[in-house]
Structures are given as structure tokens and as C-alpha cells.
Image (cartoon, grey):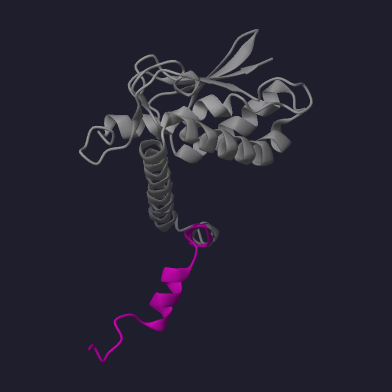
Amino acid sequence: MIEEKVFTDQELKAMGERTLDLVLASIEVCDKETAKKLSQRMYNEFSSMHDLYRDWLTDVLSFIGRRFGDEVLYDVMEETVHKGFSKLLAKRYSGKEPHRKLQILATGLRGHLQSLKIEEDREKYTIIVDPCPSGGFQIKAGFYDRSDGFLRIKKAQPMTFNRPEFPVYCAHCCFQNMVIDEISGEPLFITEPGKNIGWDPCRVYIYK
């Protein structure tokens, strides 16, 4: 048993402080180098948590699909995605002008810690995600190819965009597309997985 303390009370206090608060404090005293280091630390913290929950969710969906089959997996995703997106997103998006929907969606997608390419034409806005830092990253990293890898849904069906051997995480995009603007009755946005999913960019459309 170690009798002496390893950390001082000040070090323990600092360890428990939000990184954001430390960044802002560094900016207040014009300590640019510390602010830069802390900003990178904050990025690393969020990235680790993002990946943990992404992969945990994918493992849960894989377990459900393997244990109970496609029909139960469909019901689970339909229920949870619709409930979550309807409660969290529909209220933010519904009734908003298309340009405002684009701003809200871009804010959310930046939470994946990947830059976006955004285009506009007369018909729509297009967000191009290349590379995809969620489902696409899992595919490129080989998470579906390991002996204990994630589930690929074998049968082509609506939740796989009618493609066989579809990565289970990416199936949530089908259910996302079903969430409706309560005012206009139109989908909030439409996600189109890349042709060679995981390697080709995914696109998200908001129609004007």
C-alpha cells in the first residue's frame, strides 16, 4: 500500500475540470500554446467517447440480429430510430426553411468530428461525407471482418437499401429517411449510402 499521495489536491482538482473551461481560461490570459494543446485534448476526449458509443451500439445491434433475426432487428431499429429522431430532430427541423435545416444538420454531422463538403443547386442541398467517420470508418478498419466482427445483414431488403451483406450500423440510415417534417409531411432529409459502402462517400440531401 502506498502511504504517500501520488497527486496533489490541485492536480486532482485540475484533472476533474472540464477541458472546455480550461481552454476558455487559457484564451482569457492569451496563453495560445496551452489553449491549442487543450483543444486537441478535448478533441481526443470526444473522439474516444464517440467511437466507444458507436461501436457499442453496433455490437448491440449485431447481437440482436444474430440472436433474434432480421424481423426483430428491423422492429428494434424502426422503434428506436423513429422515437429518437422524432423527439430530438423533428421538433428542431419541422417547419424550418431548407437553408435552416441544412445549418442544423451540418451542426449535428460535425459531431462526428469529420469535415463536410456541402453543395447547393436549384433543387437541393447536398452534404457529402467522405470519408464517413462512423459506419464507413468501421468498414475500413475491418471491424466487420474479424472473427468477432459486427453483423452484416445478409438478405437484401428495405433496411439495407436492397443490398445484400449490408453493415448493420449503416442500416439506421434507412429509418432516418422515414422521419417526417410534421409541418410539410416531407422527409427531414434523405441519406444515400455510397455505392461501395464504406469506401465511396455517402450523401445527405435536403430538398428545397
In this view, the residue farthest toward the left is 147
Verify whether residue 17 appears in magenta.
yes
Looking at the rendering, the stretch of residues picked out in magenta corresponds to 1-23
For the point 52% across and 35% down, which residue is it? Answer: 77
**Left or right of 146 in this view: 170:** right
Residue 58 location, quadrant: top left
For the point 69% across and 14% down, which residue is it? Answer: 208
* Rendered view: 147 above or below 101: below
Place of residue 200 in the rendered image (x, y in percent of width and height, measured from the top left): 36, 18
* Rendered view: 8 above or below 73: below
Place of residue 170 in the rendered image (x, y in percent of width and height, measured from the top left): 43, 29
For the point 29% across and 81% down, which residue is it? Answer: 6
**Left or right of 51 in this view: 116:** right
Residue 163 location, quadrant: top left
Residue 129 location, quadrant: top left
Verify whether residue 110 appears in magenta.
no
In this view, the residue farthest toward the top is 122
Place of residue 82 in the rendered image (x, y in percent of width and height, measured from the top left): 61, 35
Please state, as top left, top right, bottom left or bottom right, where the N terminus lies in the image.
Answer: bottom left
> What number of labels is visible?
0
